[in-house]
Image: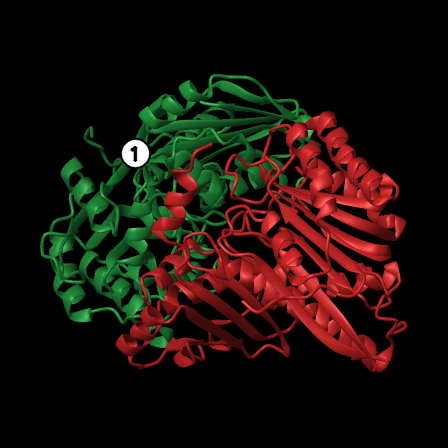
Chain colours: A red, B green
């Protein structure tokens, strides 16, 4: 992986403090803006949500933030009033160390559900993680590591664009390898930029990006209790408020960072052998395309067919058929790995053996379902379903 | 399995005709009423549906039927106009042999999608299956076998009740072990009764039963293209039209037969180690309970936890949380195998090792999620998700 840089005026750190038993695995991360950063956040739509989500939901509307503290290994979810107190305590401890109000600090936790946070371990970690804060790429990488749970690789993404003649950077990190489902801001993600944005702009641009990235991925469709995506913009690039083309360019950079991170989550999906890109095009609305893509992505039968390198068009089109979208079979054509296999409602002759071989030998699989209903489309990413996924999720130790 | 009897005035048969390669496996079944039987049918809501479903949808509104012919091994789905012609041809051949109009015969096909029916094999089978028609239990069993695909056991159910002082029988058979999802009349099912019912009554009573049975099961939530449930009532018990209590008794018998068959489908779910009964009670409406039960049943994380004998309440309540039903965590309590594990929004102390052991050593698992929101409830059945399921659906031969 190439070295990833933070935007100007951001520092980060990550380390092991003892939430997790294994001393070699990081479990605490901190992201700090040197001054107040305009802030937006989108959070899980699960009715059962972690205490940190509840605290963030209260604080994001304030508009600006100084820091985001994140622990992994314990989600602080389903922990009642004590969980809320513990989440607020985390922010107060960090605030005291970096010199701001507790309300200026956001908090995320990810890991096991239903256990109280180990406060002693965290208390020992806060001064150390603050002492290690740095703008360098190693610190950003450490922070990306500190938010991992079953992830096998840290996930970072960066884009640099010119806004009003000044270089602006957008950098983000995310975690997630399971309990990944759409209809939310999936999993933990922090995106930072030194662009100048109002909180309202932050919110609009974050939602735009999330709708094209984290809301378009699925491992098994299980919406987590702790999903959070946060955007911080501290203006340190001194590029002024972006408008017109400059705004579109910045939005493109934020979208690209979010998409990179979303795809990285799917590439790291638990037990997966294949990375599947599903394009649904030619529907009346984006929502129609989204519903169809989601049903295909969530179908265990489609996923296992891909695991078995079978170009099983019947499973794909029948999943499309129960997405709740009105269409006729004749409206639909299907390509797998760019090979046409079903056209205008009927299967067509193709070299199924060669197509199966192309699935077997390539990690990336493309599914392209084309309708004749309109101009809308969506791109969606998912993983296959392997015996290893079942093993990971059945035979884990609690 | 105890011997199952047909209702009076029904005959059945099943045999191998050559749709499937293996000569030892049945692939053609026929159910015949000696006279016109009032008929109802509910069919898949998939926009992609088999040709037999299209033919049945045209014919069921006629109100009465003489016979249902079913082949397994080929679903005659995604076969275009030729598929429709082939399905009608099947009914015409059978009609000529039993002496009725083609319109009086319904047809179902189940198996591989996208291949044309082997008409020669079927043509050779029709005279033989008609010749073997009989009211005895062995013939009913043969017919139950002829509709099987990946099922490992034939599925039959019977109830006898007294209607207006006369004995009335309700008997049914169903098939299905995968591509089982709700929101439909799941898989193939034929229920026969010698009760006297109008077509409108048949329709009302079949929908009542299906909503409490086939629509409350899920293996992997993939709605099939060929799902059909058909009820035939030929009046041969001479019990008159049931009203009041008698109607409730008959409805209970039809419900019980449908539930027996639905549960048999889940007990035979591909690769499953556990049979899971999910009770969601105390919601404002049945629809709320249904949505929550369905999300729990369809969650790969819940299923794999049960595979691993882990009483993972976090996965269960978080699945409930994304069902789109408004509730607070405090409204919710959870029992697994009758052991309370989560109460009023917080986990409670219990012997997790003993509970895990009870899951590991029993095929049946009960999940009971109790809300304080109202009086509605639903019972839902599902299977766990095993590496064997993945193997069956990834490494099959096409």
Q: In this rendered view, identify the residue nearer to me: B12 or B79.
A: B79
Residue at image coords 72%, 56%:
A134
Q: In this rendered view, identify the residue nearer to me: B292 or A261.
A: A261
Whether residue A37 sits left or right of residue B392 in the image: it is: right
Res B306 → quadrant: top left
User: Which percent across, then down, holds residue A376?
Assistant: 64, 75
Is residue B197 among what the camera can see? no
Q: In this rendered view, identify the residue nearer to me: A256 or A235.
A: A235
Image quadrant containing the N terminus of chain A: bottom right
User: Which percent across, then down, holds residue B65?
Assistant: 34, 52
User: Which percent across, then down, holds residue A137?
Assistant: 65, 62
Q: Chain of mark 1?
A: B
The single residue placed furthest to the left in the displayed view is: B23
Res A159 → quadrant: bottom right
Is residue B69 among what the camera can see? yes
Q: Could you classify mark 1 by the number of other residues whose Cα lies within 10 Å: few (under 14), some (14-19), or many (20 or more)?
A: many
Res A130 → quadrant: top right
Whether residue B379 sits left or right of residue A241 in the image: it is: left
With respect to residue B194, does A295 lie above or below?
below
Q: Secondary structure at mark 1?
A: strand
Residue at image coords 75%, 36%:
A90
Residue at image coords 64%, 24%:
B346
User: Which percent across, then down, holds residue A377?
Assistant: 61, 73
Q: In this rendered view, identify the residue nearer to me: B140 or B162.
A: B140
Residue at image coords 29%, 78%:
A354
- Which residue position holds label 1? B157
């Amino acid at each position: 992986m190439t070295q990833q840089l933070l935007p100007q005026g951001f520092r980060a750190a990550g380390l092991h403090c003892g939430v997790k038993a294994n001393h070699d695995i990081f479990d605490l991360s901190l992201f700090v803006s040197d001054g107040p950063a305009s802030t937006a956040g989108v959070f899980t739509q699960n009715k059962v949500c972690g205490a940190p989500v509840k605290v963030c939901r209260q604080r994001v509307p304030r508009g600006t933030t100084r820091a985001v503290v994140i622990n992994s290994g314990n989600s602080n979810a389903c922990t009642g009033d004590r969980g809320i107190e513990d989440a607020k305590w985390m922010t107060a401890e960090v605030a005291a160390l970096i010199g701001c109000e507790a309300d200026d600090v956001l908090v995320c936790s990810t890991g096991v559900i239903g256990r109280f946070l180990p406060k002693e371990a965290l208390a020992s970690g806060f001064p150390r993680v603050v002492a290690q804060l740095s703008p360098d790429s190693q610190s950003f990488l450490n922070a990306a590591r500190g938010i991992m749970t079953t992830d096998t690789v840290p996930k970072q993404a960066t884009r640099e664009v010119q806004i009003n003649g000044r270089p602006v950077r957008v950098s983000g990190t995310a975690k997630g390898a399971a309990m990944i489902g759409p209809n939310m801001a999936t999993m933990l993600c922090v995106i930072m930029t030194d662009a100048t944005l109002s909180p309202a702009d932050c919110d609009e641009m974050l939602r735009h990006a999330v709708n094209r990235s984290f809301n378009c991925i699925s491992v098994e469709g299980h919406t987590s209790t702790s999903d959070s995506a946060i955007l911080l913009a501290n203006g340190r690039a001194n590029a002024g408020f972006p408008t017109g083309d400059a705004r579109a360019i910045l939005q493109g950079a934020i979208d690209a960072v979010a998409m990179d991170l979303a795809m990285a989550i799917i590439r790291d999906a638990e037990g997966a052998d294949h990375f599947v890109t599903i394009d649904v095009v030619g529907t009346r609305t984006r929502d129609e395309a989204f519903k169809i893509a989601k049903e295909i992505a969530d179908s265990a039968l489609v996923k296992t067919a891909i695991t078995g390198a079978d170009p099983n068009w019947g499973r794909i089109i029948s999943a499309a058929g129960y997405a709740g979208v009105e269409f006729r079979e004749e409206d639909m054509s299907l390509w797998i790995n760019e090979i046409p296999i079903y056209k205008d409602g009927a299967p067509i002759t193709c070299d199924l053996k060669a197509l199966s071989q192309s699935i077997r030998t390539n990690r990336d699989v493309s599914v392209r379902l084309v309708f004749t209903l309109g101009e809308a489309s969506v791109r969606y990413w998912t993983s296959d379903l392997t015996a290893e996924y079942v093993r990971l999720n059945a035979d884990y130790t609690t």
